[in-house]
């Protein structure tokens, strides 16, 4: 059983998900891509200071700059604006959502099929021994009305979820997304869902929320894969 997600702060059940070996077997069509960037986000107890390009600016300012880059489809620059460095990313595209969902979310797809499901997971770090995973999903529908209704179901606590790509695909720790740092956005006939989770070290909840709020503005998977 997967965890629930939705509502304020994501509202998800801790743990759950698929173990590393099972996840890898289930996504044979996954594409792995490298990354680059600059370091230096305020993440854990040993991490202080902003990225070089945004030194002295507060987190809300960095988040706004990161969202500008994300809207342009430049994920690596978006993390740089947050003072982070992209290590690796994995992407997968599907034409069905039922097989990768559960709960009321899956029931929704049984009567209102999605037209596409694009998923990507990033591993990023702050240069101070702290790293996190960023999951982004784009769920496409035939109409904006369908997308709006799906977002309502997805955002509702205890409604189920679409399974994010796991950190095991990036050869990192098998981190389970809790949904506590969750953002969603309606983009025409597409619903964008972003989640973050600490992989190593420590990040404040504020930072994890801010990174999710940047990631959710990535326009599509093709830009994010570049």
Image (cartoon, rainbow, N blue to C red):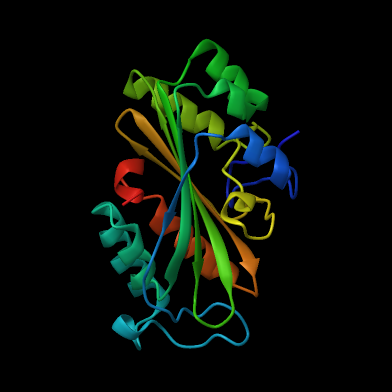
Q: Residue at x 36, y 32 (%)?
A: 190
**Residue 26 location, quadrant:** top right
Out of 176 and 21, give the one closest to the viewer: 21
Residue furthest top in the image? 111
Is residue 220 visible from the viewing direction of this image? no
Is residue 198 visible from the viewing direction of this image? yes
Q: x, y percentage for residue 202?
A: 64, 74
Out of 64 and 25, give the one closest to the viewer: 25
Q: x, y percentage for residue 65?
A: 29, 68
Q: x, y percentage for residue 137?
A: 46, 40
Figure check: 60 above or below 98: below
**Left or right for 152, reference 179:** left
Residue furthest left in the image? 72
**Residue 153 location, quadrant:** top right
Out of 177 and 12, give the one closest to the viewer: 177
Q: Residue at x 71, y 38 (%)?
A: 22
Figure check: 172 above or below 60: above
- Quarter of the image containing the N terminus? top right
Figure check: 48 above or below 163: below
Q: x, y percentage for residue 126?
A: 49, 76
Q: Residue at x 54, y 19 (%)?
A: 109
**Left or right for 146, reference 70:** right
Number of numbered discs overlaid on the protein picture: 0
């Amino acid at each position: 059983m997967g965890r629930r997600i939705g509502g304020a702060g994501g509202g998800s059940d801790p743990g759950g998900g698929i173990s590393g070996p099972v996840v890898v077997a289930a996504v044979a069509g996954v594409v792995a891509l490298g990354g680059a960037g600059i370091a230096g986000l305020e993440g854990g107890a040993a991490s202080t200071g902003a990225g070089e390009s945004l030194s002295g600016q507060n987190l809300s300012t960095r988040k706004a700059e990161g969202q500008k880059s994300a809207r342009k489809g430049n994920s690596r620059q978006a993390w740089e604006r947050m003072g982070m460095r992209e290590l690796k990313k994995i992407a997968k595209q599907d034409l069905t959502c039922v097989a990768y969902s559960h709960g009321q979310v899956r029931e929704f797809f049984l009567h209102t099929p999605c037209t596409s499901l694009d998923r990507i997971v990033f591993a990023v770090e702050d240069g101070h021994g702290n790293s996190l995973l960023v999951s982004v999903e784009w769920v496409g529908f035939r109409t904006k009305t369908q997308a709006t209704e799906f977002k309502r179901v997805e955002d509702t606590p205890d409604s189920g979820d679409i399974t994010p790509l796991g950190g095991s695909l990036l050869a990192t720790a098998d981190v389970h997304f809790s949904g506590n740092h969750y953002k969603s956005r309606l983009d025409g006939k597409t619903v964008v869902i972003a989640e973050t989770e600490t992989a190593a070290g420590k990040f404040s909840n504020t930072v994890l929320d801010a990174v999710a709020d940047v990631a959710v503005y990535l326009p599509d998977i093709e830009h994010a894969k570049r």
